[in-house]
Image: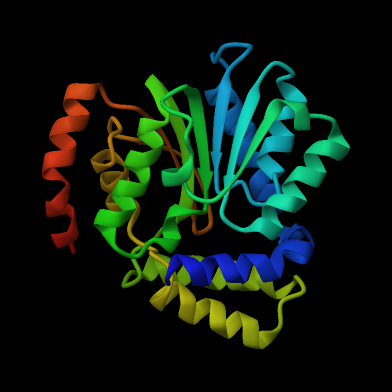
């Protein structure tokens, strides 16, 4: 799926996005809770990069619990970013946020962030080399040793495990305000339009994007999450030279 198509979808969904996915709130709360523990040793004045900030759910969670943290919210959908901005203003942390409408490559801030979050974003990049470039863009925005918490839908589409997880996922979605037609489109999208890959493949994509080998710390159904640390500069250079081979992985 082309990035302009993804952006258009989220523009349309912005006003109702949180209500539409309300049933997944326990998953998000658990993910954020664990990330909070992984980020516990960050400075009290840490700078956090939130890539694909959406409606600002993770910003709100971490801002409420860390009054000294500052945030860079990167979101290409103007409608989603506006909902995010309104939430930040309503909840009183907008003054600690820089809102960037666009993609990472147009963000002028350099490697000044202590940590980054990127939840359910890279899965929309189907080309594996481009997906690693996306992670490399985040690595460049982090300080040396900076950490990344990222999540994506992941599974081996040819496995029995995927069929079990997909059935449970669809049953969960069936109880929300999603039509049967939308459910069918979701099933097809996971096969054709979303980069759902085995977890080990996503871990290698992250590592090829300038990070130390990531550690999977979370799974809820199809959602998997990893903790990664920016690789040393000399290793990042070697990774960049080897990155083209990634496009040949099965």
For the N terminus, the quadrant is bottom left
Q: Is residue 240 left or right of residue 123?
A: left
Q: Position of residue 175 (x, y in %)?
A: 75, 72
Q: Position of residue 180 (x, y in %)?
A: 67, 86
Q: Is residue 177 left or right of residue 238?
A: right
Q: Residue at x 75, y 44 (%)?
A: 85
Q: Is residue 175 above or below residue 230?
A: below
Q: Position of residue 140 (x, y in %)?
A: 36, 32
Q: Residue at x 18, y 64 (%)?
A: 250
Q: Residue at x 33, y 53 (%)?
A: 131
Location of residue 141 by image quarter: top left
Of 224 and 132, nearer the camera is: 132
As drawn, which residue projects farthest toward the right? 90
Q: Is residue 49 above or below residue 150?
A: above
Q: Position of residue 93 (x, y in %)?
A: 78, 29
Check the image and tell me how it is coloured.
rainbow
Q: Is residue 41 left or right of residue 174?
A: left
Q: Residue at x 33, y 58 (%)?
A: 198
Q: Is residue 220 left or right of residue 132?
A: right
Of 237 and 64, nearer the camera is: 237
Q: Is residue 194 above or below residue 86?
A: below
Location of residue 174 by image quarter: bottom right
């Amino acid at each position: 799926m082309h990035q302009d198509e993804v952006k258009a979808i989220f523009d349309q969904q912005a006003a109702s996005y949180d209500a539409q996915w309300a049933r997944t709130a326990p998953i998000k709360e658990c993910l954020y809770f664990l990330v909070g523990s992984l980020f516990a040793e960050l400075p009290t004045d840490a700078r956090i990069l939130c890539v694909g900030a959406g409606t600002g759910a993770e910003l709100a969670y971490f801002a409420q619990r860390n009054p000294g943290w500052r945030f860079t919210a990167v979101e290409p959908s103007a409608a989603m970013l506006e909902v995010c901005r309104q939430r930040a203003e309503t909840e009183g942390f907008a003054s600690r946020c820089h809102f960037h409408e666009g993609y990472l490559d147009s963000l002028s801030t350099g490697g000044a962030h202590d940590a980054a979050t990127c939840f359910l974003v890279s899965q929309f990049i189907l080309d594996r080399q481009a997906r690693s470039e996306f992670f490399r863009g985040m690595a460049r925005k982090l300080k040396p040793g900076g950490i990344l918490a990222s999540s994506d839908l992941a599974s081996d589409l040819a496995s029995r495990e995927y069929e079990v997880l997909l059935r449970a996922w669809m049953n969960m979605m069936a109880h929300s305000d999603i039509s049967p037609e939308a459910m069918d489109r979701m099933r097809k999208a996971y096969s054709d339009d979303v980069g759902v890959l085995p977890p080990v493949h996503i871990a290698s994509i992250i590592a090829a994007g300038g990070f130390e080998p990531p550690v999977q710390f979370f799974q809820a159904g199809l959602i998997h999450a990893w903790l990664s640390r920016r690789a040393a500069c000399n290793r990042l250079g070697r990774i960049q030279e080897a990155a083209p081979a990634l496009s040949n992985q099965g």
